[in-house]
Amino acid sequence: MRKIITLALTGFCLTSCRKDIVLPPQIITVSTPEYTSIQGFYLLNEGNMGSNKSTLDYYSYDSGKYYRNIFASVNPNVPMEMGDAGNDIKIYGSKLYAVINCSNKVEVMEAQTAKRLGQINIPNCRYIRFHGGYAYVTSYAGPVQLNPDYEQKGYVAKVDTATFQVLDHCIVGFQPDELEIVGSKIYVANSGGYMFPNYESTVSVIDIETFTETKRIEVARNLHRLRADKYGNLWVSSRGDYYNQPSRLYWVDTKTDSLIDSLNIAVSNFHLDDDLLYAYSTEWSYITMSNVITYGIVDVTKKEVVTTNFITDGTEQNIKIPYGIMVNPITKDIYVTDAKNYVSPGTLYCFDKNGKQKWNVRTGDIPAHFVFLGKIKK
Protein backbone atom coordinates (compact mmCIF):
# COMPACT_ATOMS: atom_id res chain seq x y z
CA MET A 1 0.00 0.00 0.00
CA ARG A 2 1.27 3.43 -0.84
CA LYS A 3 1.43 6.22 1.74
CA ILE A 4 -1.43 8.15 0.18
CA ILE A 5 -3.88 5.37 0.91
CA THR A 6 -3.11 5.41 4.64
CA LEU A 7 -3.62 9.15 4.90
CA ALA A 8 -6.79 9.07 2.87
CA LEU A 9 -8.24 6.48 5.23
CA THR A 10 -7.16 8.08 8.50
CA GLY A 11 -7.71 11.72 7.61
CA PHE A 12 -11.48 11.62 7.98
CA CYS A 13 -11.15 10.85 11.72
CA LEU A 14 -9.86 14.40 12.28
CA THR A 15 -13.17 16.17 11.74
CA SER A 16 -13.17 18.26 14.91
CA CYS A 17 -11.36 21.12 13.16
CA ARG A 18 -14.25 21.71 10.78
CA LYS A 19 -17.70 22.99 11.75
CA ASP A 20 -19.55 21.19 8.95
CA ILE A 21 -19.77 17.43 8.57
CA VAL A 22 -16.93 15.82 6.63
CA LEU A 23 -17.75 12.48 5.09
CA PRO A 24 -15.03 9.85 4.80
CA PRO A 25 -13.62 9.26 1.34
CA GLN A 26 -15.60 6.64 -0.54
CA ILE A 27 -13.46 3.72 -1.64
CA ILE A 28 -14.49 1.50 -4.53
CA THR A 29 -12.66 -1.46 -6.04
CA VAL A 30 -12.95 -0.99 -9.79
CA SER A 31 -10.25 -3.23 -11.27
CA THR A 32 -7.45 -5.68 -10.57
CA PRO A 33 -4.08 -4.27 -9.47
CA GLU A 34 -1.54 -3.18 -12.09
CA TYR A 35 2.10 -3.04 -11.03
CA THR A 36 4.05 -0.57 -13.14
CA SER A 37 6.15 2.50 -12.45
CA ILE A 38 2.95 4.58 -12.28
CA GLN A 39 1.42 4.48 -8.80
CA GLY A 40 -1.93 5.97 -9.75
CA PHE A 41 -3.53 9.20 -10.83
CA TYR A 42 -5.41 12.14 -9.39
CA LEU A 43 -8.64 13.37 -10.93
CA LEU A 44 -9.67 16.96 -10.22
CA ASN A 45 -13.43 17.51 -10.31
CA GLU A 46 -14.28 21.08 -11.27
CA GLY A 47 -17.61 21.36 -9.45
CA ASN A 48 -20.18 23.63 -11.06
CA MET A 49 -19.19 27.30 -10.90
CA GLY A 50 -20.35 29.18 -7.82
CA SER A 51 -20.99 26.05 -5.77
CA ASN A 52 -17.60 25.65 -4.02
CA LYS A 53 -17.68 21.94 -4.90
CA SER A 54 -14.30 21.23 -6.47
CA THR A 55 -13.04 17.87 -5.16
CA LEU A 56 -10.06 15.57 -5.61
CA ASP A 57 -10.24 11.84 -6.37
CA TYR A 58 -7.44 9.28 -6.58
CA TYR A 59 -7.10 5.95 -8.38
CA SER A 60 -4.47 3.45 -7.19
CA TYR A 61 -3.02 1.05 -9.75
CA ASP A 62 -1.47 -0.94 -6.88
CA SER A 63 -4.85 -1.84 -5.40
CA GLY A 64 -7.33 -1.24 -8.21
CA LYS A 65 -9.26 1.02 -5.81
CA TYR A 66 -10.80 4.41 -6.49
CA TYR A 67 -10.91 7.00 -3.68
CA ARG A 68 -13.43 9.83 -3.87
CA ASN A 69 -13.07 13.27 -2.27
CA ILE A 70 -9.73 12.72 -0.52
CA PHE A 71 -8.76 16.40 -0.07
CA ALA A 72 -11.48 17.04 2.52
CA SER A 73 -10.52 14.01 4.59
CA VAL A 74 -6.75 14.54 4.44
CA ASN A 75 -7.14 18.26 5.21
CA PRO A 76 -10.03 18.58 7.69
CA ASN A 77 -8.85 21.99 8.96
CA VAL A 78 -9.28 23.74 5.58
CA PRO A 79 -12.59 25.65 6.00
CA MET A 80 -13.65 25.96 2.35
CA GLU A 81 -12.06 22.69 1.21
CA MET A 82 -10.70 22.97 -2.35
CA GLY A 83 -12.90 25.85 -3.46
CA ASP A 84 -14.72 26.95 -6.59
CA ALA A 85 -14.03 25.45 -10.01
CA GLY A 86 -10.89 23.33 -10.28
CA ASN A 87 -9.35 24.08 -13.66
CA ASP A 88 -5.99 22.28 -13.88
CA ILE A 89 -3.78 19.87 -11.94
CA LYS A 90 -0.08 19.05 -12.28
CA ILE A 91 2.80 17.50 -10.32
CA TYR A 92 6.21 19.16 -10.17
CA GLY A 93 8.89 17.59 -8.03
CA SER A 94 7.30 16.41 -4.79
CA LYS A 95 4.37 18.82 -4.96
CA LEU A 96 0.87 18.58 -6.40
CA TYR A 97 -0.66 21.80 -7.78
CA ALA A 98 -4.40 22.32 -8.32
CA VAL A 99 -5.54 25.50 -10.07
CA ILE A 100 -8.84 26.65 -8.54
CA ASN A 101 -10.19 29.21 -10.98
CA CYS A 102 -12.91 31.24 -9.25
CA SER A 103 -11.31 30.90 -5.81
CA ASN A 104 -8.34 32.81 -7.27
CA LYS A 105 -5.73 30.39 -5.98
CA VAL A 106 -3.48 27.45 -6.71
CA GLU A 107 -3.63 24.83 -3.98
CA VAL A 108 -0.23 23.25 -3.27
CA MET A 109 -0.11 19.77 -1.73
CA GLU A 110 2.30 16.93 -1.11
CA ALA A 111 2.16 14.77 -4.22
CA GLN A 112 2.23 11.49 -2.28
CA THR A 113 -0.41 12.36 0.31
CA ALA A 114 -2.49 15.33 -0.94
CA LYS A 115 -1.71 17.07 2.36
CA ARG A 116 -2.04 20.83 1.93
CA LEU A 117 1.19 22.85 2.03
CA GLY A 118 -0.15 26.28 1.11
CA GLN A 119 -1.60 28.31 -1.73
CA ILE A 120 -0.57 30.71 -4.47
CA ASN A 121 -2.87 33.70 -4.88
CA ILE A 122 -3.60 34.51 -8.53
CA PRO A 123 -6.87 36.09 -9.72
CA ASN A 124 -9.02 34.08 -12.15
CA CYS A 125 -6.20 31.57 -12.67
CA ARG A 126 -6.54 28.98 -15.42
CA TYR A 127 -3.64 26.63 -16.26
CA ILE A 128 -0.16 25.85 -14.93
CA ARG A 129 3.20 24.62 -16.31
CA PHE A 130 6.73 24.45 -14.86
CA HIS A 131 10.29 25.21 -15.87
CA GLY A 132 13.56 25.66 -14.00
CA GLY A 133 12.10 25.80 -10.50
CA TYR A 134 9.28 28.18 -11.43
CA ALA A 135 5.58 27.72 -12.03
CA TYR A 136 3.92 29.66 -14.85
CA VAL A 137 0.19 30.26 -14.46
CA THR A 138 -2.23 31.87 -16.90
CA SER A 139 -4.68 34.39 -15.46
CA TYR A 140 -7.71 36.10 -16.94
CA ALA A 141 -6.80 38.88 -14.45
CA GLY A 142 -10.24 40.51 -14.53
CA PRO A 143 -13.61 39.44 -13.13
CA VAL A 144 -15.84 36.66 -14.48
CA GLN A 145 -17.87 38.81 -16.83
CA LEU A 146 -19.15 38.41 -20.39
CA ASN A 147 -18.44 41.70 -22.14
CA PRO A 148 -17.51 42.27 -25.82
CA ASP A 149 -15.64 45.40 -24.69
CA TYR A 150 -13.71 43.71 -21.88
CA GLU A 151 -10.71 45.91 -21.07
CA GLN A 152 -8.50 43.81 -18.77
CA LYS A 153 -5.89 41.80 -20.65
CA GLY A 154 -4.70 38.55 -19.13
CA TYR A 155 -1.21 37.60 -18.08
CA VAL A 156 1.15 34.77 -17.20
CA ALA A 157 2.35 34.79 -13.60
CA LYS A 158 5.85 33.57 -12.69
CA VAL A 159 5.88 31.82 -9.31
CA ASP A 160 8.73 30.63 -7.09
CA THR A 161 7.87 27.00 -6.30
CA ALA A 162 9.92 27.13 -3.08
CA THR A 163 8.15 30.13 -1.52
CA PHE A 164 4.81 30.15 -3.43
CA GLN A 165 5.36 33.84 -4.13
CA VAL A 166 4.42 35.50 -7.43
CA LEU A 167 7.61 37.11 -8.75
CA ASP A 168 6.55 38.66 -12.04
CA HIS A 169 3.80 39.04 -14.66
CA CYS A 170 3.86 39.01 -18.44
CA ILE A 171 0.85 40.59 -20.15
CA VAL A 172 -0.56 38.59 -23.06
CA GLY A 173 -3.96 38.60 -24.80
CA PHE A 174 -7.48 38.52 -23.44
CA GLN A 175 -8.50 35.46 -21.38
CA PRO A 176 -5.39 33.30 -21.87
CA ASP A 177 -6.01 29.58 -21.42
CA GLU A 178 -3.55 26.71 -21.79
CA LEU A 179 0.17 27.27 -22.05
CA GLU A 180 3.03 25.07 -23.20
CA ILE A 181 6.79 25.40 -22.72
CA VAL A 182 9.09 24.46 -25.60
CA GLY A 183 12.81 25.08 -25.09
CA SER A 184 13.23 28.68 -23.99
CA LYS A 185 9.75 29.81 -24.98
CA ILE A 186 6.30 29.81 -23.41
CA TYR A 187 3.33 29.56 -25.76
CA VAL A 188 -0.04 30.85 -24.57
CA ALA A 189 -3.45 30.30 -26.17
CA ASN A 190 -5.42 33.57 -26.01
CA SER A 191 -9.16 32.88 -26.12
CA GLY A 192 -11.03 36.14 -25.57
CA GLY A 193 -13.68 33.83 -24.18
CA TYR A 194 -15.46 36.57 -22.22
CA MET A 195 -15.66 38.84 -25.27
CA PHE A 196 -18.22 37.15 -27.53
CA PRO A 197 -18.40 37.80 -30.44
CA ASN A 198 -14.99 39.54 -30.33
CA TYR A 199 -12.87 36.48 -29.61
CA GLU A 200 -9.08 36.50 -29.56
CA SER A 201 -7.25 34.49 -32.25
CA THR A 202 -3.56 34.49 -31.36
CA VAL A 203 -0.90 32.45 -29.57
CA SER A 204 1.47 34.60 -27.51
CA VAL A 205 5.17 33.70 -27.52
CA ILE A 206 7.09 34.57 -24.33
CA ASP A 207 10.86 34.47 -23.97
CA ILE A 208 11.50 32.74 -20.65
CA GLU A 209 14.81 34.45 -19.88
CA THR A 210 13.49 38.00 -20.24
CA PHE A 211 9.91 37.00 -19.43
CA THR A 212 8.52 39.26 -22.14
CA GLU A 213 6.11 38.63 -24.98
CA THR A 214 8.09 38.60 -28.22
CA LYS A 215 5.48 37.65 -30.80
CA ARG A 216 1.82 36.89 -31.53
CA ILE A 217 0.99 34.05 -33.93
CA GLU A 218 -2.36 34.43 -35.70
CA VAL A 219 -4.18 31.08 -35.59
CA ALA A 220 -7.99 31.04 -35.23
CA ARG A 221 -10.79 32.31 -33.02
CA ASN A 222 -11.30 31.33 -29.41
CA LEU A 223 -8.15 29.25 -28.80
CA HIS A 224 -7.97 26.83 -25.88
CA ARG A 225 -5.57 23.84 -25.74
CA LEU A 226 -1.85 23.54 -26.51
CA ARG A 227 0.48 20.51 -26.77
CA ALA A 228 3.95 20.22 -28.23
CA ASP A 229 5.05 17.00 -29.94
CA LYS A 230 8.65 15.79 -30.18
CA TYR A 231 8.99 16.99 -33.77
CA GLY A 232 8.79 20.71 -33.03
CA ASN A 233 5.08 21.11 -33.72
CA LEU A 234 2.69 22.88 -31.36
CA TRP A 235 -0.86 21.55 -31.60
CA VAL A 236 -3.50 24.20 -30.92
CA SER A 237 -7.26 23.78 -30.57
CA SER A 238 -9.83 26.41 -31.52
CA ARG A 239 -13.35 26.33 -30.13
CA GLY A 240 -14.62 28.39 -33.07
CA ASP A 241 -17.49 30.83 -32.61
CA TYR A 242 -20.32 28.29 -32.06
CA TYR A 243 -22.06 29.62 -35.18
CA ASN A 244 -20.36 29.54 -38.57
CA GLN A 245 -16.72 28.99 -37.65
CA PRO A 246 -16.28 25.40 -36.42
CA SER A 247 -13.83 24.02 -33.92
CA ARG A 248 -10.57 22.91 -35.56
CA LEU A 249 -7.09 21.59 -34.74
CA TYR A 250 -4.06 23.61 -35.92
CA TRP A 251 -0.34 23.15 -35.78
CA VAL A 252 2.42 25.71 -35.41
CA ASP A 253 6.12 25.25 -36.21
CA THR A 254 7.98 26.19 -33.01
CA LYS A 255 11.23 26.65 -34.90
CA THR A 256 9.81 29.49 -37.01
CA ASP A 257 6.83 30.36 -34.75
CA SER A 258 4.50 30.29 -37.73
CA LEU A 259 1.14 28.64 -38.41
CA ILE A 260 1.48 25.70 -40.80
CA ASP A 261 -1.96 24.19 -41.39
CA SER A 262 -5.08 22.72 -39.79
CA LEU A 263 -7.01 19.46 -39.66
CA ASN A 264 -10.73 19.13 -40.16
CA ILE A 265 -11.44 17.71 -36.72
CA ALA A 266 -13.29 19.39 -33.86
CA VAL A 267 -11.45 19.39 -30.52
CA SER A 268 -12.65 20.20 -27.01
CA ASN A 269 -9.79 18.48 -25.22
CA PHE A 270 -6.92 16.19 -26.16
CA HIS A 271 -4.06 14.09 -24.83
CA LEU A 272 -0.82 13.47 -26.71
CA ASP A 273 0.73 10.03 -26.25
CA ASP A 274 3.78 9.21 -28.36
CA ASP A 275 2.76 10.08 -31.92
CA LEU A 276 -0.99 9.84 -31.36
CA LEU A 277 -3.19 12.71 -30.26
CA TYR A 278 -6.41 11.46 -28.64
CA ALA A 279 -9.19 14.03 -28.78
CA TYR A 280 -12.85 14.30 -27.99
CA SER A 281 -15.16 17.08 -29.06
CA THR A 282 -18.43 18.31 -27.66
CA GLU A 283 -19.08 20.87 -30.38
CA TRP A 284 -22.03 23.10 -29.54
CA SER A 285 -23.88 25.03 -32.23
CA TYR A 286 -26.23 27.93 -31.54
CA ILE A 287 -27.67 27.33 -34.99
CA THR A 288 -28.79 23.74 -34.36
CA MET A 289 -28.92 24.17 -30.55
CA SER A 290 -27.23 20.80 -30.12
CA ASN A 291 -23.86 19.11 -29.57
CA VAL A 292 -21.94 16.95 -32.03
CA ILE A 293 -19.75 14.53 -30.07
CA THR A 294 -16.73 12.76 -31.55
CA TYR A 295 -13.76 10.75 -30.23
CA GLY A 296 -10.86 11.07 -32.64
CA ILE A 297 -7.21 10.10 -32.99
CA VAL A 298 -4.68 12.13 -34.97
CA ASP A 299 -1.32 10.79 -36.13
CA VAL A 300 1.00 13.77 -35.56
CA THR A 301 3.70 12.39 -37.85
CA LYS A 302 1.37 11.98 -40.82
CA LYS A 303 -0.80 14.99 -39.92
CA GLU A 304 -3.94 12.98 -40.52
CA VAL A 305 -7.04 11.80 -38.66
CA VAL A 306 -6.81 8.07 -37.94
CA THR A 307 -10.34 7.65 -36.60
CA THR A 308 -13.29 9.73 -35.46
CA ASN A 309 -14.32 7.21 -32.81
CA PHE A 310 -11.69 5.46 -30.69
CA ILE A 311 -14.46 3.84 -28.59
CA THR A 312 -15.22 0.66 -30.50
CA ASP A 313 -17.76 -1.27 -28.40
CA GLY A 314 -20.67 1.17 -28.66
CA THR A 315 -20.47 2.31 -25.04
CA GLU A 316 -19.88 5.93 -26.08
CA GLN A 317 -23.67 6.08 -26.18
CA ASN A 318 -23.60 6.06 -22.36
CA ILE A 319 -21.48 9.22 -22.20
CA LYS A 320 -23.58 12.38 -22.17
CA ILE A 321 -20.90 15.12 -22.00
CA PRO A 322 -17.25 13.99 -22.39
CA TYR A 323 -15.15 16.37 -20.33
CA GLY A 324 -11.71 14.95 -19.56
CA ILE A 325 -9.25 12.63 -21.32
CA MET A 326 -5.97 10.88 -20.53
CA VAL A 327 -3.98 7.91 -21.89
CA ASN A 328 -1.77 5.65 -19.81
CA PRO A 329 1.63 5.70 -21.57
CA ILE A 330 2.43 2.12 -20.50
CA THR A 331 -0.82 0.16 -20.89
CA LYS A 332 -2.36 2.57 -23.44
CA ASP A 333 -5.65 2.49 -21.52
CA ILE A 334 -7.81 5.48 -22.42
CA TYR A 335 -9.66 7.42 -19.71
CA VAL A 336 -12.67 9.58 -20.56
CA THR A 337 -14.86 11.43 -18.06
CA ASP A 338 -18.54 12.30 -18.36
CA ALA A 339 -19.81 15.56 -16.83
CA LYS A 340 -23.43 14.48 -17.42
CA ASN A 341 -25.64 17.50 -16.53
CA TYR A 342 -22.84 19.58 -14.91
CA VAL A 343 -24.55 19.64 -11.48
CA SER A 344 -24.46 16.02 -10.31
CA PRO A 345 -21.68 13.42 -9.92
CA GLY A 346 -19.98 12.40 -13.14
CA THR A 347 -18.46 9.14 -14.34
CA LEU A 348 -14.93 8.05 -15.21
CA TYR A 349 -14.66 5.43 -17.96
CA CYS A 350 -11.59 3.28 -18.64
CA PHE A 351 -11.17 1.80 -22.13
CA ASP A 352 -8.42 -0.54 -23.23
CA LYS A 353 -6.12 0.31 -26.13
CA ASN A 354 -8.62 -1.22 -28.54
CA GLY A 355 -11.41 1.04 -27.35
CA LYS A 356 -13.37 -1.50 -25.31
CA GLN A 357 -14.66 -0.52 -21.88
CA LYS A 358 -12.87 -2.12 -18.91
CA TRP A 359 -14.60 -0.36 -16.02
CA ASN A 360 -16.33 2.82 -14.91
CA VAL A 361 -16.80 4.58 -11.58
CA ARG A 362 -18.74 7.53 -10.15
CA THR A 363 -16.71 10.69 -9.55
CA GLY A 364 -17.34 14.16 -8.15
CA ASP A 365 -19.17 16.88 -10.06
CA ILE A 366 -17.69 17.67 -13.50
CA PRO A 367 -14.65 15.34 -13.55
CA ALA A 368 -12.11 17.09 -15.71
CA HIS A 369 -8.35 17.09 -15.11
CA PHE A 370 -5.88 14.21 -14.62
CA VAL A 371 -2.29 13.85 -13.47
CA PHE A 372 -0.27 10.65 -13.05
CA LEU A 373 1.56 9.96 -9.79
CA GLY A 374 4.85 8.16 -10.09
CA LYS A 375 7.72 8.09 -12.49
CA ILE A 376 6.54 7.39 -16.02
CA LYS A 377 8.90 5.18 -17.98
CA LYS A 378 8.43 2.43 -20.51
Image (cartoon, rainbow, N blue to C red):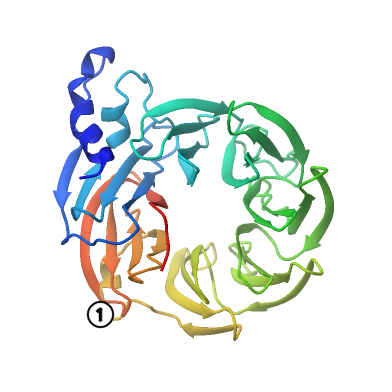
In the rendered image of this protein, does residue 42 appear above or below residue 333?
above
Q: Which quadrant holds residue 116? A: top left
**Is residue 186 toward the left or the right of residue 345 in the image?**
right
List x then y, in percent, for residue 29.
14, 53
Q: Is residue 104 visible?
A: yes
Amino acid of disc 1: Asp
**In the rendered view of the protein, which quadrant contains the C terminus?**
bottom left
| Residue in view at x 67 percent, y 33 percent | 142
**Can you give x and y, in whole percent of width and height, for residue 35 in the image?**
25, 61
The answer to whether 159 is drawn above or below residue 366 in the figure is above
- At a point 69% along the width and 61% down the height, the residue shown is 221
Q: Is residue 102 shown above or below 59?
A: above
In the rendered view, tell whether residue 61 sits above or below residue 78: below
Left or right: 87 with respect to 335? Answer: right
Q: Nearer the viewer, residue 37 or 11?
A: 37
Count every numbered label the image shows and give the total: 1
**Where residue 201 appears, x then y in whole percent?**
73, 59
Q: Which residue is mark 1?
A: 313
Displayed quadrant of residue 323:
bottom left
Q: Secondary structure at mark 1?
A: loop
Residue sitting at the far right: 214
**Viewer-proximal residue, 372 or 18?**
372
Q: Residue at x 15, y 49 (%)?
A: 28
Neighbours of disc 1 within 10 Å: few (<14), some (14-19), many (20+)? few
Nearest the camera: 71 or 217? 71
Say if residue 345 shows up in the picture. no
